[in-house]
Image: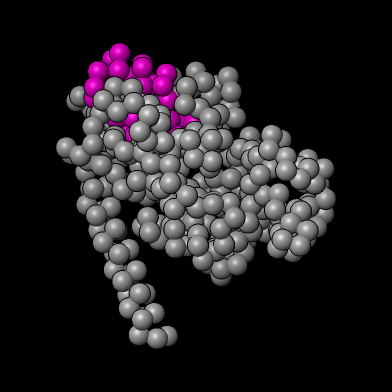
Amino acid sequence: MGIRQKLLSFLFSQLILVLMVSNHNNAMGLKLGYYHKTCPNAESIISKTTYRFISRAPTLAAPLLRMHFHDCFVRGCDGSVLLNSTKTSISEKDAIPNQSLRGYHVIDAVKSAVEEACPGVVSCADILALVARDSVSMIHGPYWKVPLGRRDGRVSILNEVFAELPAPFANITQLKQMFAAKGLNTKDLAVLSGGHTIGTSHCLGFTNRLYNFTGKGDTDPSMDPNYIVKLKQKCKPRDTTALVEMDPGSFKTFDEAYYTLVAKRRGLFQSDSALLDDPETKAYVILQASTHGSTFAKDFAESMVKMGQVGVLTGNQGEIRKHCALVN
């Protein structure tokens, strides 16, 4: 390794360290029961309102979980993904990876119910973190305690999504770097990828693997050929509307089946298959696939708490929005 590469490597590691320290200091401002005195029924109101929607449409759990993930990876968990575009600025919400997000109406309904009880107290960022947790729990997934006290950001920029959010086409090196930049380790990557056990995807996220993997009209050799045949029946080239289950057969159930599929080379995205390209992530996939997800629920809860503390605004930073789609 040349001096220049060593220096770049050193600077990158220092940057990660600075980000982790600043993340840690702000995360220290979060605590369980944060609204105990200022809005004692907040968590109960949020849970009841969320249940009203999830009980009728359980498939909303996946996009709401994904919304929280997409929020935290761009500018930290500050509710920036919820902001509408303005005349002068196009927001994260309108970036292609976020155009398939659903469930904003759930966040708005929850915010409205909380505002009625305690005006100007509970942030949209905290609401999103709690709604994601409650949604997963309500479809019999794991439950975790959410430290609260996040403040809402005032900035949302479309282009930051492409730089910060892991893409479905990412390889294992890119994935590990993007997670490390948020203070999340390789195990968190393997665990949080398991969120793909629920939900659906548009064909656009993976058709390159079926029809034109290297630009020569070929398929992705890392994907089970039998699975490619099945996917081709659902997704024709240039199909932008069809939806495919991420975890066929149990896409509505929060379970370890995702890891069984990845182990069989049936992960839908390149980023799913990439978990087999690193010794640590591969070992995790094999462990969950071979033990019926013995530690998955516990691990997922721990990694979600960790992710929920990425880049948070606390204290006097940011604001408490009156409406989640608009800055005050």
Q: Nearer the viewer, residue 263 or 236?
A: 236
Residue 279 magenta-highlighted: no
Q: Is residue 230 left or right of residue 120?
A: right
Residue 118 magenta-highlighted: yes
Q: Which residue appears farthest toward the top when viewing the image?
A: 116
Q: Which residue appears farthest toward the bottom when viewing the image?
A: 2
- Can you see residue 202? yes
Quadrant that contains the N terminus: bottom left
Q: Nearer the viewer, residue 158 or 169?
A: 158
Residue interval drawn in magenta: 107-136
Q: Is residue 67 left or right of residue 78?
A: right
Quadrant that contains the C terminus: top left
- Please state the horizontal and vertical placement of residue 299, each as a whole percent of the image: 47, 51
Occupied quadrant, residue 178: bottom left
Point 56% across, 58% down: residue = 170
Point 55% across, 21% down: residue = 55
Q: Which residue appears farthest toward the front when viewing the image?
A: 88
